[in-house]
Amino acid sequence: MRPSQWVKNLIIFFPLIFAKKLFDLEAFILSFIAFICFVLASSIIYIFNDICDLEYDKKHPIKKKIRLLANSNLKKKDAYLLIVLLGFLLSLLLKSNISILNTVIFFFILNISYSLYFKNIVIIDLVIVSMSYLVRVFAGGNIINVQLSGWLLICIFCLALFMISFKRIAEKKISGFKSRPVLKKYNNEILLKIIDLTAICSIIFYSLYTVLVNPNLIFTIPLVLMGFFRYYYLYYTSKIFEESPIKLIFSDKPIILLLIFWLIIVLVII
């Protein structure tokens, strides 16, 4: 179920923050329900993905030790049973929160198709994973009936693509292509070009959002720039570059401080 990855679903609260409803109790509860729904949904996908990737995970130097299916601490039938249980809990939540049902269904279609097919297609695999972040944001907006700016949505997509591309580089460095066949089709040069392009686009689109939609947030642009610079710094100077972008971000104090400062400014100014 990968609890350490549940933090990705916090992006669901973005619409709540930018719509100035963070302290609206009803809206917060609805957003929290959406968060729980996607924790359950993403956990189901993680389990399903582990079933599909079982043979490759056994060849990965890290995953073969920590993934319960790969290290034989969990049987396939138990994994399927857990999927059914989580699916039942998710259906109970969605029954009373029908506004995000279509979004959750699309999330499943997107990620199941990725696990079964698209993860083996170069570039498309990056795009599909990045789109999963957009789906979460749409769910956060739908449940509180808020529509986010297009500039911000494009920024989030580019930011996700930036982090996923760095993840691919780390995977190549740690395990080569043994755990993910599509890595055979990538080299560091093309991935770094994608990273550079998406970093530039993320900064530009975030800046356009602040200038055209929410001018008060223009003061956060330097923090965003510093965040990208820090991420690059870690890649080029660290002997061990974390395979998981989430682990990297939340294990680095400067990035955590930048995130805290950004959130404080956003909450105060908005």
Image (cartoon, rainbow, N blue to C red):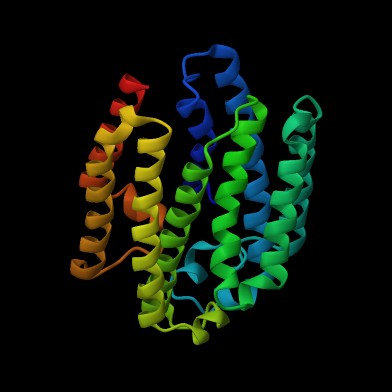
Tell me which residue sits at (38%, 71%) in the image.
170
Estimate the x, y position of residue 221 in percent, counting from the top left: 27, 42
- Outermost bottom residue: 184
Tell me which residue sits at (60%, 33%) in the image.
140
Tell me which residue sits at (57%, 40%) in the image.
137
Horizontally, is 23 left or right of 74 in the view? left
Q: Nearer the viewer, residue 59 or 267?
A: 267
Q: Is residue 13 visible?
A: yes
Estimate the x, y position of residue 83 in percent, counting from the top left: 74, 50
- Outermost front residue: 212
Estimate the x, y position of residue 66 in percent, counting from the top left: 49, 62
Estimate the x, y position of residue 121 in percent, counting from the top left: 62, 78
Q: Which of the 4 image quadrants contains residue 125?
A: bottom right
Horizontally, is 115 left or right of 15 in the view? right
Q: Nearer the viewer, residue 141 or 45?
A: 141
Quadrant of the frame with the C terminus: top left
Q: Is residue 68 visible?
A: no
Q: Which of the 4 image quadrants contains residue 200?
A: bottom left
Q: Is residue 264 above or below residue 47?
A: above
Q: Nearer the viewer, residue 180 or 217?
A: 217
Q: Is residue 194 above or below residue 213?
A: below
Horizontally, is 7 left or right of 261 in the view? right
Tell me which residue sits at (49%, 76%) in the image.
60
